[in-house]
Image (spheres, rainbow, N blue to C red):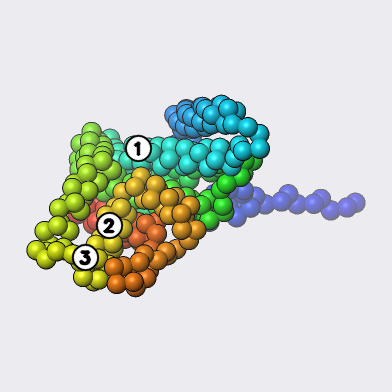
Amino acid sequence: MTDAVPPTEVGPAKRRRPFPPKLRANPVLVKELRSRMRGGRAFLILTGYLTILAGFAGLVYILSVTALSSVSLGQADYSSVGIVIFGTVVLLELLMVCFISPALTAGSITTEREQRTFELVSTTLLTARALVMGKLGSALSYLFLLLFVAFPLQALAYVFGGVAAAEVLISAVLLVVTALATSALGLFFSSSQKRTLTSTVLSYAVLLLGMFALPIILAILLQFVPLLWFLGPTAGAPEPWKEAALIYIGVLAIATNPLATAFATETLLFDEQKVFFYTQSLGNGVDLPVPLPWIPYTIFYLVLTLILIRLSIRWVRRAEP
């Protein structure tokens, strides 16, 4: 008589888990991802997002091909169609990321307060850093999903040509950095305010101020400051160091705005054929190396993101009982 084979033990280590160990280390991230993706809201936003992108891309394609159809076959340059489609898709992605990100994070901490669960979370072993990073990681995971599903629309540009790999990589960097900064902005107001409505209003007010009002103010200042200080009362060309300072200030002013950075970077990539730096000739004939706007934009908003995350953690610690 053969011995019976003992049943295989199924313990906690034998079970299949849907999240890798690094993600399971933060229970807030796991909980937020599950609750976000189990509802229908996430899929409705994703569907509407792709519908808008595809609709505008199709409209741009029809208008571009119609405009080129009037040109003779030997003179038509269809690479411009790819450039226009790619620029339109990236621009729409940038705008949507700017306006979707605060909506995902502006109520992340305030909702815990409004639902009377913040004190309960504070009594656990979960640290303020883990709470903030879990909320931020959940929002960023969904935002990166939105960016990833739009890659096929960007790939349409390769059918017509005219778009280099450097442009695709730079656009990806701009989108990711913008998603980080705007998400951190909403999280900061969510941790410092007590109501979701207040946090949301402040997040969008600061975002709209930075995207539209601040560029207008900087443009006005850049028109008058050179006349009052850089050029001075003397006639003629300014001194080389003043001219160089004016160029760098202009680049930094452009780098504070995502839309201006995208337009200026694309223009310089097309005109100068440079990815990182281009040269600008001064009045004395010296060539000044100038970074493309996407470089100071990335540095500035990454530093701003780290500061906002740090402040958010401090606000959460301060609110703990």
Please indicate, yes or no, whether residue 228 appears anywhere in the rendered image: yes
Which one is closest to the eye, mark 2 or mark 1?
A: 2
Q: Which residue is mark 2?
A: 250
Please indicate, yes or no, whether residue 156 appears anywhere in the rendered image: no
Q: Which residue lies most toward the right here?
A: 1
Q: Is residue 6 above or below residue 96?
A: below
Which one is closest to the eye, mark 3 or mark 2?
A: 3
Left or right of 15 on screen, residue 263: left
Q: Quadrant of residue 282?
A: bottom left
Q: Tell me what residue is drawn at x 61 percent, y 45 percent.
A: 161
* Kind of residue sitting beneath label 1: Phe
The one of 135 and 224 positioned closer to us in this rendering? 224
Distance from the alpha carbon under mark 3 to that under mark 2: 18 Å
- Say whether disc 3 or disc 1 marks the residue closer to the N-terminus: 1
Q: Is residue 191 above or below residue 49?
A: below
Q: Tell me what residue is drawn at x 37 percent, y 57 percent.
A: 293
Q: Quadrant of residue 113?
A: top left
Q: Is residue 52 above or below residue 216?
A: above
Q: Tell me what residue is drawn at x 26 percent, y 49 percent.
A: 188
Helix, strand or loop for disc 1: helix
Q: Which residue lies most toward the front here?
A: 236
Image coordinates of residue 303 in percent, x first then y, are 31, 60
Q: Which residue is mark 3?
A: 237
Which one is closest to the eye, mark 3 or mark 1?
A: 3
Image coordinates of residue 125 in percent, x first then y, are 34, 56
Image coordinates of residue 167 in percent, x first then y, are 51, 52
Q: Which residue is mark 1?
A: 99
Distance from the alpha carbon under mark 3 to that under mark 1: 43 Å
* Kind of residue sitting beneath label 2: Gly
